[in-house]
Image (cartoon, grey):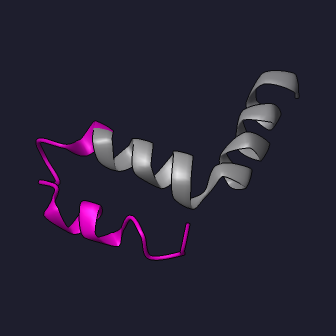
């Protein structure tokens, strides 16, 4: 999976209607390590 694979999906989404899809794509595919680290800090610190 390349760095820009989800760019086309994100460009087609509506910022207001598809906000949850945008967050899912960004967190799950683009920044998974960052999300895991922030979740760990919120839960365990």
Most extreme residue toward the right is 45
- Relative placement, left or right, of 19 versus 36 is left
**Residue drawn at 53 percent across, 48 percent down:** 27
- Residue 35 percent location from the top left of the image: 66, 45
Q: Is residue 6 magenta?
A: yes
Quadrant containing the C terminus in the rendered view = top right
Q: Is residue 6 above or below residue 22?
A: below
Kindly indicate the quadrant of the structure image that contains residue 24.
top left
* Residue drawn where x is 15% and y is 62% of the image: 12
Q: Of 25 and 38, which appears nearest the observer? A: 25
Residue 36, horizontal then vertical, whole percent: 73, 41
User: Which residues are the magenta region?
Assistant: 1-20
- Relative to 5, is 1 on the left or the right? right
Image-based side of 27 in relation to 39, left or right: left
Residue 6, quarter of picture? bottom left
Write down the quadrant of residue 37 in the picture. top right
Q: Is 42 on the left-hand or right-hand side of 11? A: right
For the point 30% across and 42% down, the residue is 21
Q: Nearer the viewer, residue 20 or 9?
A: 9
The magenta stretch spans residue 3: yes
The answer to whether residue 20 is above or below residue 15 is: above
Magenta stretch prevailing secondary structure = loop
């Amino acid at each position: 999976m390349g760095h820009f694979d989800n760019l086309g999906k994100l460009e087609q989404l509506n910022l207001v209607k598809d906000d949850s899809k945008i967050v899912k794509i960004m967190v799950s595919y683009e920044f998974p390590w960052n999300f895991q680290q922030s979740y760990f800090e919120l839960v365990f610190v």
